Amino acid sequence: MLLPLISKYRKKGALAFLSFLLFAGFMVSAHMDSGFTKDRPKPTSLLYVLNADDNTAMWATYEHKLSDWTAQYIIDKLAVPPQINETISSKYGTDFTYTYEAPLKNIPKPTIEVQLDTVINNVRSIRLCITPNRPINRLEVFTNPIDILKADVNGIQLSDHFLQNRNSGRLITNYISDKNFTDINLEFPADSPLELTFYEASNDLLNNELFSIPERREDQIPMPFVLNDAIVTVQKLKFGQ
């Protein structure tokens, strides 16, 4: 039925070439989907992110083409909230690709104590103590765009060069064991509002008793060089003018 119509095209060669390209594309895609083995596994990723301030949670992934393991949780590919990708870091600065709403779990957030808050000569000084209430692997702290004049973490002073070149807003990454607390001392202009965002991460998503995440198949592995298989809590603290 279509033969008379096709015969009217002057550029049959171009049509045939286009058909070949489409066929080749489908074949490559199919090969990529089925080409993972125990010896050449597919990197996969999944995180649970709990916003402790507004009591919401989401699943997140770094995968561009979702594996069937991840697709159990990333059911619809929702846009990633900008503030999440601006903060949660990995070795190569990889951004999340997709998120999806997740059920709320009773993940304990850290205790944040303000032990000092004074203003002298228009310089505001604060001292914080952040204590985990669950086993965690790392704490990350970010700030809004603000001039941090001085900072030390657990008695170690951060360099002026670092403080003046914090393009991402990241202030510290502290790797933690045995629920150790983190002491932070900051000095900043008294007329500048400060917003701190705290991210606690534990690498126990697959064996935490609050979750029932299945093990990966033999042809899948955790994606390397990124925060993965993690439970993350997000919490903010603001100091106004």
Image (cartoon, rainbow, N blue to C red):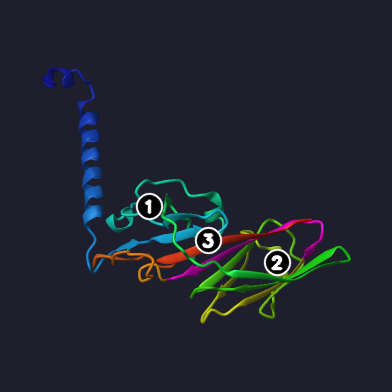
Q: Quadrant of residue 119?
A: bottom right
How far is disc 3 from disc 1 in space, using C-alphas? Answer: 18 Å
- Name the amino acid, label 1: His
Label placed on residue 128: none
**Residue 106, image x, y percentages:** 46, 64
Please name the residue that numbered disc 1 is placed on. 64
Marks 3, 1: nearer the viewer: 3
SS for dot 3: loop
Task: Determine if residue 40 is in view.
Answer: yes
Q: Earlier in the sequence, mark 3 or mark 1?
A: 1
Please state the extent of the stretch shown in magenta in the rendering: 188-203
Is 66 or 141 nearer to us in this picture? 141
Mark 3–mark 2 distance (CA, rounded to whole Å):
19 Å
Q: Quadrant of the N terminus?
A: top left
Q: Is residue 197 part of the magenta span, yes or no?
A: yes
**Chain-order first, disc 2 or disc 1:** 1
3 or 81: nearer the viewer: 81
Which residue, given by chain and number where applicable, does mark 3 sit on? 88
Asked if the residue at tag 1 contacts the one at tag 3, i.e. Cβ–Cβ closer than 8 Å, the answer is: no
Q: Amino acid at mark 3?
A: Ile
Alpha carbons under labels 2 and 1: distance apart = 34 Å
x, y percentage for residue 154?
A: 66, 79
- At 32% from the left and 53% from the top, the residue drawn is 71
Q: Can residue 227 be seen by looking at this rendering?
A: no
| Residue at 33% over, 63% down | 43
Q: Which residue appears at 48% of the width and 65% of the height?
A: 107
- Choose top left, top right, bottom left or bottom right for residue 4: top left
Task: Count neighbours of disc 1 (C-alpha within 10 A) and say few if under 14, some if 14 to 19, many if 20 or more.
Answer: few
Q: Which mark is residue 163?
A: 2
Amino acid type at circle 2 is Leu
